[in-house]
Amino acid sequence: MLAELEKLQNEALAAIPLADSDQALEALHIEYLGRKGRLRKIMGELASLPADQKPAAGRLANQVKQRIQSALAERTNERGRTALTPAPPLDITVPGTGRKPGTIHPITQANDELVEVFARLGFETAHGPEIEDEYHNFEALNMPPDHPSRDSFDTFYIGGPGEDSGLLLRSHTSPVQVRVMETQSPPIRIVVPVKVFRPDTVDASHFPMFHQLEGLYVEEGASFADLKAVLGMAMQATFGGFDQHIHTRFRLSFFPFTEPSAEVDVSCPFCSGGGCSVCGQDGWIEILGAGMVDPEVFRHVGYDPERYTGFAFGVGIDRIAMLKLGISDIRLFYENDARFLAQF
């Protein structure tokens, strides 16, 4: 197979410089890299190789693909440069077209509003790396390798074929709270507004990258009553303002890093809890996950769980923006359509 890959690469690199039209380049791309192309056929035979030969064959196949892609791109650029014609002289008397002022992205608006709400409640903002290790993303949060809850926090791993770097794109905001607790002593009162990544199937309510805001409060004597008070005030400021009272409802749930845990609903601000299409006629909208920090998490960061207690909560920033702005499809946030974004 290695010899076949080398032969394929040599043939492609010899043919590409001779392509003298866009159609010829496209035909070469289809022949070598297309879904039914020659490289794909060879790669389809990888499964039949002995296990000790698969890594080398896989690496070479990726190298061949990259070299052919680079050669095609370089030849395309060469043809583009030769086709350029001198630009017409600049007429400085022609009026300019002008530029319309930009707007703040709706997710950024929702993020800034939430950060401001919690800042008024005494929470500072913290950030952490987007590329995490398994310890901070899983183990330190009470999710050992064989724990079933890791499935729901699945994410994108970093590394080539056959590699195990132990690095991944963080799948939730909680690794940041671990890093903060590793470097700071209580009391701690932070919110973490960051991007997270999960291999979700794209649809109207899911996207592989999305935004969350997590809060963490740790001190001696922190209680569930404090958690309810903080979230009640925050949701009132976010959805109710001064003219509508927003209620919160806590429902028993499970998260591996909090105990007890709860899902938190707010009374629908669009129908005042009476039932509408936004809340599914229920009168309530699920907004947050929350709970008291599991003592095992404190042990991982060196806190004494007999001395300190704390609570954590997480909310989807994208979901807040969708609810407040009446947007039904999360994909609209990421299509970069100026006609959509200019509305906000």
Image: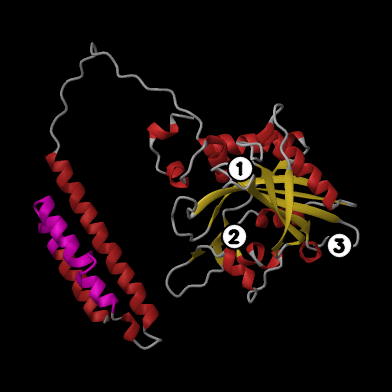
**Amino acid type, label 1:** Gly
Range covered by the magenta-colored residues? 15-44
- Residue 252, x across and y down, in percent: 73, 59
Q: CA distance from mark 2 to mark 3?
A: 25 Å
Residue that label 1 marks: 275
Identity of the residue drawn at 11% across and 56% down = 24
Q: Are marks 1 and 3 in contact (CB under 8 Å)?
A: no
Task: Point out the frontmost of discs 2 and 1.
Answer: 1
Residue 38 forms part of the magenta stretch: yes
For the question of whether residue 183 can be seen, the reply is no
Which residue is identified by label 3? Answer: 305
Q: Residues within 10 Å of mark 1 (few under 14, many from 20)?
A: some
Q: Nearer the viewer, residue 92 or 256?
A: 256
Label 1 sits on a secondary structure element that is loop
Q: Which residue is mark 2?
A: 132
Depth order, front residue of 4/293: 293
Q: Earlier in the sequence, mark 2 or mark 1?
A: 2
Decide whether residue 205 is among the magenta residues.
no
